[in-house]
Image (spheres, rainbow, N blue to C red):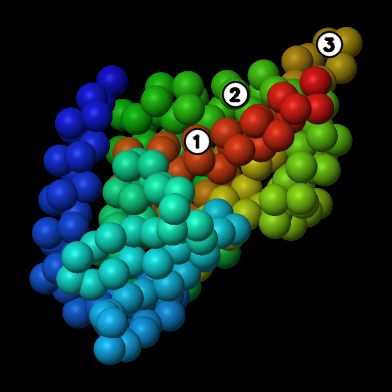
Amino acid sequence: MPRIDDYRNALTLAQDEWAGQDPQRAALLSGAEYQKEPEGTRVLFPFLNKAVTVSWPEGQVLGPDPAKDLSLQEQILILHYLLKAPGAPPAGQWITFREIPSGEFYYSAFVKRAKEPLLKTFGHRPWLLAELGVQQGGVRREEGDVCICFQAFPKIPVCLILWAGDDEFPPEGNVLFDAGIARYLIAEDVAVLAGMVVYPLIGLASKKG
């Protein structure tokens, strides 16, 4: 498991790389808004239903509440998205994590971060996923027994899908990604993103008992 120093080093590397980028071009390619003002240059975009701001060249990543820091993992992921974004539109086809390049290598991490927690919390309560997902800005789709899609980044949709179990079969579920996601994030980052989609919903579910 990565240590806190590993995350800090990864953030510093991403910030250093961001300082060498053209922020206006990066904003265009990532679907962000570019702002150049006397107090500084920044890009703004929604990340998991919350507004984030990234300054340039410093690479300071802020959420909607400047007094509340985003996690190191969130900051790293946001910078990685900006650094890798090629501007391509979504492919319009859903794939599983294993179908992402190098997805097999990070599959166990993905299962622990996202798939298992999703099934443990919502497998026997798919209706709760539908309720909480919509509350968190998700959109219902017709696939599965319950399918909720989130716009994780401007160019990256992510779907949570569940099939209810019965007397013969246990519930099944998965996290689905647009087929073009590898253009924007490497597999390791996609596993992290999947957990960030699932865990806030689990937190809300725990409050309902």
Look at label 3 and name its amino acid.
Answer: Glu
Instruction: Locate residue 101 relative to residue 144 in the image: left or right.
Output: left
Which part of the image, by quadrant, shows the C terminus? Answer: top right
- Whether the residues at callouts 1 and 2 have beta carbons within 8 Å, the answer is yes
The reply to whether the C-beta atoms of the residues labelled 3 and 1 are less than 8 Å apart is no
Q: Residue sitting at 47 percent across and 22 percent down?
A: 112
Q: Nearer the viewer, residue 187 or 60?
A: 60
Q: CA distance from mark 1 to mark 2?
A: 9 Å
Q: Which residue is mark 2?
A: 117
The kind of secondary structure element at disc 2 is helix
68 vs 105: above or below: below
Q: Amino acid at mark 1?
A: Gly
Foreground residue, 28 or 183? 28
Classify residue 41 by image quadrant: bottom left
Residue 150 drawn above or below residue 40: above
Q: Badge 1: how crowded within 10 Å, few (<14), some, or many (20+)?
A: many
Residue at the extreme front of the image, as rendered: 67
Residue 153 vs residue 19, the one in the foreground = 19
Which residue is labeled 1 in the image? 195
SS label for mark 3: loop
- The residue depicted at 23 percent of the width and 37 percent of the height is 7
Q: Give left or right: position of 134 versus 19.
A: right
Q: Position of residue 173 (x, y in %)?
A: 67, 30
Q: Is residue 183 above or below residue 71?
A: below
In the visual, does 52 lie left or right of 10? right
Residue depicted at x 39% and y 25%: 109
Whether residue 114 is situated above or below residue 15 in the rendered picture: above
Report helix, strand or loop for mark 1.
helix
Q: Residue under label 3, please give it.
A: 168
Horizontally, is 33 left or right of 187 in the view?
right
